Image (tube, helix red, strand yellow):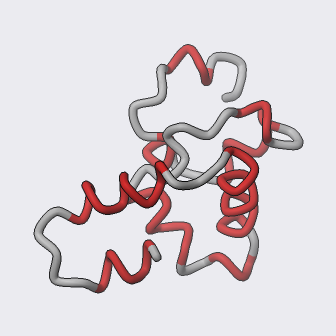
Amino acid sequence: MIGFIEESRLANKREYSGIFRAQLSNPELALLFYNGASPWGKKFKPLAEKYALFEHLELSQLVRAEEDVKFYDRKAFGDNDMQTFAGYG
């Protein structure tokens, strides 16, 4: 879906990516997180970062949050309070 939004001619892609993100549960976000961090997610990862797909991901959903958040650029987590990342590198 994020790929579709990216390739579309929509003027407000961020708004649509936010609507998509809002439909995802924390376990679904965690699954997408690890998919993007894998070799199979090399096309997905830049889109997750561009559209801040993990902005509402609860870091407790990650297996090793302190290490795993390093798989992505900070912008993948959007406006998440920086204190959320204290201790997560």
> Which corner quadrant of the image does residue 36 belong to?
bottom right
**Front residue of 14 and 19:** 19
Outermost residue toward the right in this view:
63
> Which corner quadrant of the image does residue 4 belong to?
bottom left
Residue 27 point in image, percent of width and height? 75, 50
Outermost residue toward the left in this view:
11
Q: How many marks?
A: 0
> Which corner quadrant of the image does residue 11 belong to?
bottom left
Q: Which residue appears at 32% of the width and 77% of the height?
A: 6
Q: Which residue appears at 63% of the width and 17% of the height?
A: 86
Above or below for 73 versus 39: above
Q: Which residue appears at 60% of the width and 78% of the height?
A: 42
Residue 65 point in image, percent of width and height? 78, 36
**Front residue of 58 and 66:** 58
- Judge from the rendering whether residue 10 lies leftward or rightward of residue 65; answer left or right: left
Above or below for 82 versus 4: above
**Front residue of 23 and 66:** 23
Q: Quadrant of the C terminus?
A: top right
Residue 88 point in image, percent of width and height? 70, 27
Q: Which residue appears at 54% of the width and 80% of the height?
A: 43
Residue 52 point in image, percent of width and height? 43, 50
